[in-house]
Image (spheres, rainbow, N blue to C red):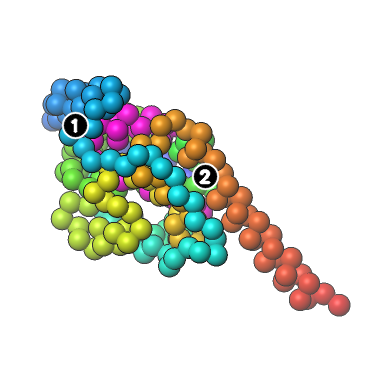
Amino acid sequence: MHAGKSRRWRARLAAVLVVPALLVSLAACSSENDGLTQQFREGSDKGFISGDGRVVEIPAGERGEPVVFTGVSELGETLSSEEYLGEVLVVNFWYAGCAPCRAEAADLEAVHQQYAGAGASFMGVNIYDQPDTALTFAKEYGVTYPSAMATGDGPLKMAFAAVAPLQATPTTLVIDASGRVAARIVGPIEGTSTLSTLVRDTIAEGAAADEGAEGTGSAENGP
C-alpha cells in the first residue's frame, strides 16, 4: 500500500474507533483474551493452533506463481494483490482471540513502521472475526495497517490456501515485488529481528533485479 493510501487508512481508522459501541467491544475483547495471552507467554498452547516459529526462505528461482487475491478490509475498502505489486508485501494471518497474535502485534507494527515508505507494506488477513472486533484489536494494539476479513470470503481463503497453513495462526508471509512468496514464518515472529531481515533482504533482491535489468538494457542499446 503506497504511503498516501496508508495515511488515509490510518485516518479513517482513527475516526471509526471513537464510536462508543466499539469501545465497549474493545473492553470485552480485552477481558476475554488477556488470559490467553498470558497463557501463551507462560508456554501454554490453550486456545489457539500455532506453528513453532520456523522460518522458510524460498530462493527466487524456486518460488511459485504470484499470489492473486482481492479482499475487503475492516473499514470496507478493497484490498488487492494488484495494488501491492512492485513492492514487498508482508501478510500476517491472525484473529483477536489468538494469544500469540496478540503477543506479536507490537513487533509486527514496529517492522511495518520501519519499512513504511521504504519498499514494503503490511496487510493482515483476519481469519475468524467480524470487522468491529478487528477494529478494536487495532486500537488496543496500535496496529496501523489494514486487514482483509476472511470470514465468509471463500475466494480470499483459497487465494492463500496453497501458500499458507491457515489453520496455523499466526503465520506471516513475505511476498516479493512480483507477488511471489519469498519467505514464510509459521508461528509468532518473537521479536523484530528475523522479520526485519527478511523484509530488508527481499527489498534488496528486488532492487538488485531492477539494476540488472537496467544494465542489460543499456548494454543492448550500446555500440
Q: What residue type is labelled 2?
A: Leu
Q: Is mark 1 on a helix, strand or loop?
A: loop
Q: Earlier in the sequence, mark 2 or mark 1?
A: 1
The residue that label 1 is drawn on is: 46
Per the model, the C-alpha gap separating discs 2 and 1 is 29 Å
Residue 84 placed where, x, y %? Answer: 44, 56
> Can residue 122 be seen by looking at this rendering?
no
Estimate how packed mark 1 is, as few (under 14), some (14 to 19) or many (20 or more) residues with alpha carbons within 10 Å.
few
x%, y% of residue 175?
45, 54
Q: Do the residues labelled 2 and 1 touch (CB within 8 Å)?
A: no
- Given this view, does label 2 or label 1 mark the residue nearer the observer? 1
Marker disc for residue 198:
2
Residue range in magenta is: 86-110
Residue 91, compared with residue 52, is above or below; it is below
Residue 3 lies within the magenta run? no
Image quadrant for the C terminus? bottom right
Residue 67 relative to residue 216: left or right: left
Residue located at (48% from left, 63% from top): 63
The crowd level at tag 2 (other Cα within 10 Å; few <14, some 14-19, many 20+) is some
